[in-house]
Amino acid sequence: MDKRPNLFSHGTSELSQDAFICWLAEWANPTYKETDECLYEASIGFIRRIYDLHKKNFPASIKEIKVTKQFKGLDILIEVNGNQAILIEDKTYTKEHSNQLKRYYEEVVKLEKYKESDLLPIYYKIGNQSDYSAVIDAKYMLFTRKQMLEFSQENIDRGVQNQIFLDYYFYLREIEQKYDSYKTLLLSEWKSEAWEGFYEELKQRGIKGQYGYVANPNGGFYALWWNEREDNDCRQYLQLEEGRLCFKIYVADKHRRKELRDKWSKALIERSHNYSFNVEKPRFGNGRYMTVAVVRDYRVGDGKGRIDIPGTMGVLGEVEELLKMVDVR
């Protein structure tokens, strides 16, 4: 395909994404079937996927689609055949906040126009997100970038040639490639999306933690924290701060912070000599959250300057074991 400018490279906001979803959903109206049958079928397929996510029976036929933007704060409300409603909260790189999902759902319930069993709430997210528990608690089903890419590819294979549809697909594919770039970039070349993609893979491989951006005066970084343990003195956990791994403690009692920091640092360094990585003393702070020891680069290379994921998982397993073995009491 010839190279050409992409509409969504310029329209990157959630409003632009809202517009695409509204446009796509509206194509399910029977009025447009003869205009572009492939796009009409794609729109029907998009709505069908939402019904499938909710494990609800798809209507025998769609006679009318009514799309409303910004309904009581909700990004998109799609009415199907006058008696069912799809609620879509659309996010690019931000996440849900302030109980907004439950509030939007309740606003639609208050209409008393639809049975609750006929409401299909969807949380559509094109960026990565570490924790979806609030989405699930609010009874929304997750529709991810990967799912939209799969849907789009299927319909392009079936003959969709509309340039707006293609532009959105290529836009999402470019985002996907950025998140997957940790697989192919040199370790020294990783950018923010590569770190997020890497942390997501670690979670998929069994690391039970959360990741996100940590702001600080030096510009901030992407972190993943996990393996929390606690005793009567303090809480201990592990944190990846991009290229370095930190052993951290949380101490509520300000009078014991220096004592516990020094004890944990000494114990971790002394017990680490039988492991495959080097544990070092960091530059100490003296707050509630403190780094007591660091591994400067825990990532294992593949011999060509790129990541060896199984090897790196092995190091992380050893690090977890070390923290478990240390007792400063």
Image (cartoon, rainbow, N blue to C red):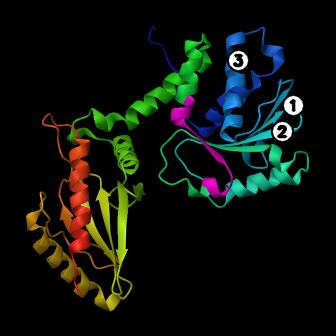
Q: Amino acid at mark 1?
A: Asn
Q: Residue at left 72%, top 36%?
A: 51
| Contact check, label 1 and label 2, Cβ < 8 Å | yes
Residue underneath mark 1 = 81
Does the rendering let one see residue 221?
no
Tag 3 near tag 2, CB within 8 Å: no
Residue under the image location 29 percent in, 70 percent down? 248
Residue assigned mark 3: 41
Left or right: where does residue 230 sit relative to residue 114?
left
Dot 3 alpha-carbon crowd within 10 angstroms: few under 14, some 14 to 19, many 20 or more: some
**In the image shown, does 216 or 120 lie closer to the viewer?**
120
The residue stretch that appears in magenta: 135-148
- The residue depicted at 56 percent of the width and 15 percent of the height is 156
- Above or below for 55 versus 239: above
| Residue at mark 2 | 84
Within the magenta stretch, is there residue 58?
no
As helix, strand or loop, the secondary structure at mark 1 comes to loop
Residue 288 drawn above or below residue 61: below
Q: Give the residue type that dot 2 points to.
A: Gln
Q: Nearer the viewer, residue 203 or 72?
A: 203
Residue 159's spot in the image, x, y percent?
60, 10
Residues 42 and 66: in front is 42
Residue 12 image-quadrant placement: top right
